[in-house]
Image (tube, rainbow, N blue to C red):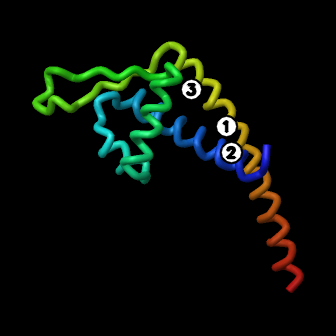
Amino acid sequence: MTERSDHETRMTEEAHYRLMHLLEQEPYLSQREIAKRMGISLGKVNYCVQALAEKGWIKMGNFYRSQNKQAYLYQLTPRGLREKAAMTLRFLHRKEAEYQALHQEIERLRKEVGKV
């Protein structure tokens, strides 16, 4: 895998993780509200929702009691819950590695500043 495709894969996985986390907490959010909260375009939200549904990680259903008949309920499937747990672990390991690298860089910079 190239560095670029590895980066794109991580970015996609992070978007999917954040979306799944948000939907688990608030399954009635509109895609417009999801886009606002995640800081991404409405098109990207739609793309991610469709990708997660195709993988069988979420299911969508119309929320018929709503005044807005376009409203959906997004639910993580059992398979989606397992994948979210695995993503959480991968995300945690990646963030811990980033933290360690950042901590080392800060220490190096402090030493460099101390020499000046």
User: Which residue position is annotated with label 1?
Assistant: 92
* Mark 3 residue element: helix
For marks 2 and 3 on the same chain, the one whose residue lies earlier in the sequence:
3
Distance Cα–Cα, label 2 vs label 3 = 16 Å
Identify residue for label 3. 84
Residues 46 and 10: in front is 46
Q: Which mark is residue 50?
A: none
Q: Is residue 6 above or below residue 54?
A: below
Distance of mark 2 from mark 1, alpha carbons? Answer: 5 Å
Mark positioned earlier in the residue sequence (3 or 1): 3
Q: What kind of residue is marked 3?
A: Lys
To which residue does mark 2 refer?
95
- Front-lying residue, 9 or 91: 9
How far apart marks 3 and 1 lie (CA) works out to 12 Å
Q: Residue at 43% x, 32% y: name it.
A: 50
Tell me whether circle 2 and circle 3 mark residues in contact (CB < 8 Å).
no
